[in-house]
Every structure is written in structure tokens, then in C-alpha cells.
Amino acid sequence: MDADTLKQKLAALPSAAVQELDHARRGFSLDVSLPPAQLVAAVTILDEAGYFIETITGVDWLGENAARIKEAQAAAAAKKAAAAKKAAEARKAAEEAGEPLPEEAAPEVEEEAPAPEPAVDDLEAIYDFNRYDRCHRVTLRTRAPRDKPSVPSIVHIYQAAHWHERETHDFFGIKFEGHGYLVPLLLPEDADYHPLRKDYSA
């Protein structure tokens, strides 16, 4: 299966978003975001195309909603300041030329910034696949709600995923449904915490 066919097959999965990247600059050729329900199908496509699994890890997106709201507020403030500066420059130019002052434009109705959402920012499981013969790396990303971080296990496709899933569960608390032996790998056997979550405190 060539790279274009692989991209088309992954993009055809429901709700999948495929981004082509510059491998030389980013280290990856394809970045694929998809819902957990499509994860096994995507991994099966990669397996059939001759890719091997490199890693599985997680990302805690706690605070993402608040950060987006802050960025939107900053952009709105910058837009308002730019409009005020432009209007002031137009008034000054009119005064210097002895022309009538331009009419003040009706103020735009500003939309209020959205209220912060509850702290349910997602956890994300990230899977890296590769083919050495083509130097073609693919990343799959799937998100699960923070209050129930569950994604399907892929151990039945790649046996090497066994310990990757255990390690990711250790550090992020993502449950890999169907794993069968999701006991701590690097943490104490009685650990009930996940140290790479942003709300973890020792």
C-alpha cells in the first residue's frame, strides 16, 4: 500500500481528520485525529500496510478550554485596539487637511467571551507508527473524556502494545478496554494515582 492510498483509507474513517506533514521538518508524515471508536480500524489499516508500532503515550489537556478562551479574549482586545487606532489616525488626518471629521462608525456589538467550561478537558492517547523502508511515520491521536478516559486496546493487533498500554495507564490513567492485564508496570502495585496528569501533586 503506497502512502497516498494509506492517507485515503485513514481519511475515509468516520470523523477522522488527516493532516499531511513535512517529514524532514516535523519527523512525521501523517497526523491523524479520530474518535476512540475508529482507533482499531485505523490501527488495522496501518498493520495491513506493514507499519510497526513505536510508542504509545498520553497528553493531559487540562486547562485547554481556559487557554482557548484567553486567546479569544486577547484577539478581540487586539482587534478593538487596532480599530480605535485607525479611527484616531483618520480623525487626525482630516483635521490636518481641514476636512470635515469622519463620522463615527456605529460601535460593533461585542460578543461576550464564552464562559469557562467545566474542568472536563480531555486526555489524549497518542500512537506512533513507522516503516523504515519508506521513512514514513504516522501518528494517531484519540481523545477520551477526563472523567472516563477509556479507549480500545490494540494488543490483539500489535502484541508489543501490551506494555505501552500499561505504561500509559500508569502515568495518565487511560483505560485500554480489552487489555486483560492492566496492572501497574512502573508504579507500585497499590498505586491509585497517575503522576503525569496535570492535577497530580505528590
Image: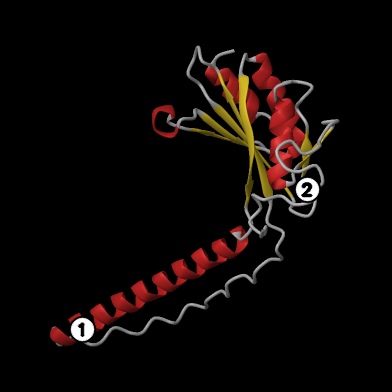
Residue type of the residue flagged with mark 1: Lys
The residue at 82%/46% (across/down) is: 190
Distance in Å between CA atoms under marks 2 and 1 = 68 Å
For the residue labelled by badge 2, is the local secondary structure a helix, a strand or a loop?
Answer: loop
| Residue nearest the viewer, comparing 128 with 97 | 128
Q: Is residue 71 left or right of residue 177?
A: left
Name the amino acid type tagged 2: Ala
Q: Is residue 48 above or below residue 178?
A: above
Left or right side of 17 for 170: right
Query: Which residue corresponds to the image point at 64% horizontal and 72% vertical from the top-left?
Result: 115
Residue where numbered disc 2 is placed:
191
> In terms of secondary structure, where does tag 1 sit?
helix
Query: Which mark lies nearer to you, 2 or 1?
Result: 2
- Expressed as whole percent of the image width and height from the top left, the position of residue 149 reads 76, 47
Query: In the displayed structure, would residue 37 be above or below residue 162?
Result: below
Image quadrant holding the C terminus, namely bottom right
Q: Can the viewer see residue 31 in this picture?
A: yes
Quarter of the rendering containing residue 106:
bottom left
**Mark 1 Cα within 10 Å, few/some/many (few <14, many 20+)?**
some
Residues tagged 2 and 1 counted as in contact (Cβ below 8 A) = no
Residue 102 placement (x, y as % from top left) = 29, 83
Return the mark for residue 92: 1
Q: Residues within 10 Å of mark 2 (few under 14, many from 20)?
A: few
